[in-house]
Image: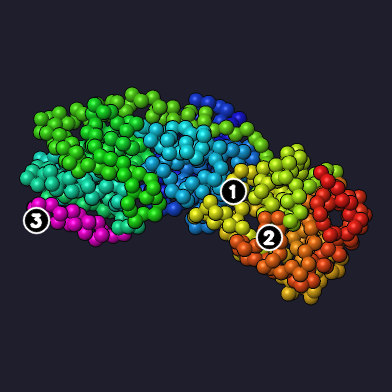
Amino acid sequence: MKKIVYCGQFHDLTGYGIAARSYLKALDTYLTTVTDVELKIYSTVIQENPNLEEEYRQLIDKYIFKSQEELDTYLINNDYACIWHTPTPLPLFADSRFRTSPGLKNSLSKIINASSSNYHLVVWETTDICDEWKETLKYFKPDGIITACEWNREVFQKYNDNVAVIPHPIENKYANCHAAPLSIPFSVDDKFCILTMSQWTHRKGFDKIISAFLMEFENNSDAALIVKTYASPTHPSTEHIVNEIQAAKAQTDNPKVQANIALITQFLNNSNIKWLFDVSDVYATATRGEGFGLTLFESVLNSKPVVAPYIGGHIDYLSKDYTYFVDGMLDCCITNDQVYSQNSLWFETNISSLRKQLRAAYNDWKNGNLAEKGVKANEYLHSLDNFKLESVGKNLVDFVDHAPHKSINAELLLRDNLADKLSYLKDAHKDETLYILNCGPSLNEYDFDYLKEFLNDKTVFSIKQAYNFFPEITDYHFYNCSNLPVEKNYKRLKQHYAYETHRPVVVASSNYDLGARWSPIQKNDIFFKIPIRTEINNEFVTVTKKFEDYLIDKNLTRPCGPGIMYETVFYMAVHLGFKEIVCIGWDLRQEDANEDNYEHFYGTNDNVVNKGDVLDWEIETTRDASKELYYWLQEKNIDIKVASSSAVYEKIERIRI
């Protein structure tokens, strides 16, 4: 049985919501023909559609998780593929900002991370995605990307080798609607009516479509433009939109000409939109970029011919014989919208070409040929098998793979408290040999390529920044809130460790609550709270030598070392069941160390966040405590060795590997 959890904005008004419902209908259509696929859905609700059609409500209810218990069972079994259909960065913050359906906890990020494989369904509007989207793809590491058009295939293949084009399915939600007229300031019965419809943003090219209409039809009282739009962050009110239309009029030769332009900014129901399609003769847009173009798609489904740029996601379903394609050029994205980088390109419509094509459509209307073009465009779309509901559903199911593989990370994610996580890990490496790569200068005594080859088939703990040099062989990574590096390749998703090439089990610790010292998106699987050193009455474990008191089996509270090795690393080694511990880079040799001159294999801590302080007695005390540590481990039949220069207790065996 192939299990799929589809995460989307199923209840929303937005384009993502419309698309999610159409894909869900495609999946439902296909699933009626097979018995070996199980589908569940999870909905993130951002801008709920209060007038959602009953058909969709029933469809959503058919597949949505009904209870937290049902969702938790899916997560624990970890045998499903996840399709997440949202703007790429949304899972980073959706659970903290938005709600889900009743009876469920916000779980979008967890569903993605706990899946046996995850696939991102997404579209984009320019030749390259922005930094935030690139970094989020690295963060979630989808096994594949599903996009809606060939234009987007080229974009996403830069970031994932496994890209499928699966378009929005043919579904005319207005077909059975009764048209409900709207009040507009002129009669449409005797006019050539142009419809343009979308949210008012610079990308949508309203500036050019309005300018072209005003210039081309200033002497045609029988031409009209209906603008159905709504506010956006850049144009938050109708007044802002009207001002932009007036600015376009002011730039024409005859700004005082009374043009037939109807502006509709309120939300409309399907019956109203059905009427707009019915009274319009052509749909026109000067869009600068479309990942698919739902309003163009719906226009063709309603047998309306289209005037549109010849580049974009919409060309996959528009016939060149029945479409008025507009010339232009790809140019840099110049916009206040920070989502679009100036280094990516979008389409700038040639207004002269747009005027020419609008005039051609007008002439065809005059000659009685325009409506036939709309019918032919509709027939062409319906001839495309890959746009049909069942085909879209089948292609979605066939593309995703859910071969179960329960990573330790996924298992830990599904355990909500520290005790359960640690119980799961108990003796996970019973009687194995552990190699610890620490940050002392002696790590440089080995050629790093040699270490990678030698340790490739062995269990490795990497401490702090040692991970950055040995990511591919690290099984467990330990870091705390001092001496944190900065990932220079990340401009928007600030992280100290990004785990791009390999995802180890991550054990984090801090004197402060989880996330107080690093970003909420910083990955970790286990978090230990460490006491603040000024609040423990000098009872450092290296001073008291009470190692037994802090065995993880006995006490989840961690001691204050000082130092990560005594606080978490050695205790985790014991808890995991290792019989032998080999340390490389555990030096404790430096005298008179302080926070400015403390030496590491990578140099000093000049470029770190929260530079760690060094107590004047710390090196000597932690070095001396290695004696009691040695005997404590011996009592547990655990051998400890050092494989590089070190000042630890003399009876700890020195070896070379």
Viewer-nearest of labels 3 and 1? 3
Residue 340 falls within the magenta-colored stretch: no
- Given residues 52 and 388, the one toward you in this image is 388
Q: Residues within 10 Å of mark 1 (few under 14, many from 20)?
A: some
- Given residues 54 and 365, the one toward you in this image is 365
N-terminal of the pair, mark 3 or mark 1, is 1
**Residue 304 to residue 597: above or below:** above
Viewer-nearest of labels 1 and 2? 2
Q: Secondary structure at mark 1?
A: helix
Any mark on residue 401, and which? Answer: none
CA gap, disc 3 and disc 2: 68 Å
N-terminal of the pair, mark 1 or mark 2, is 1
Residue type indicated by callout 2: Asn
- The quarter of the displayed image where residue 478 is located: bottom right
Residue type indicated by callout 1: Lys
Asked if one can make out residue 197 in the rendered structure from this viewpoint, the answer is no
Residue displayed at 57% across by 28% down:
36
Q: Secondary structure at mark 2?
A: loop
- Given residues 369 and 628, the one toward you in this image is 628
CA gap, disc 3 and disc 1: 58 Å
Q: Residues within 10 Å of mark 2 (few under 14, many from 20)?
A: many
CA gap, disc 1 and disc 2: 23 Å
Q: Which residues are magenta?
A: 236-255
Query: Which residue is disc 3 drawn over?
Result: 256
Please say if the residues under marks 3 and 2 sit with CB atoms less than 8 Å apart: no
Residue 463: x, y in percent?
72, 54
**Residue 469 to residue 608: above or below:** above
Residue 248 falls within the magenta-colored stretch: yes
Query: Which residue is disc 2 drawn over?
Result: 480
Magenta stretch: helix, strand or loop mostly: helix
Please say if the residues under marks 3 and 1 sit with CB atoms less than 8 Å apart: no
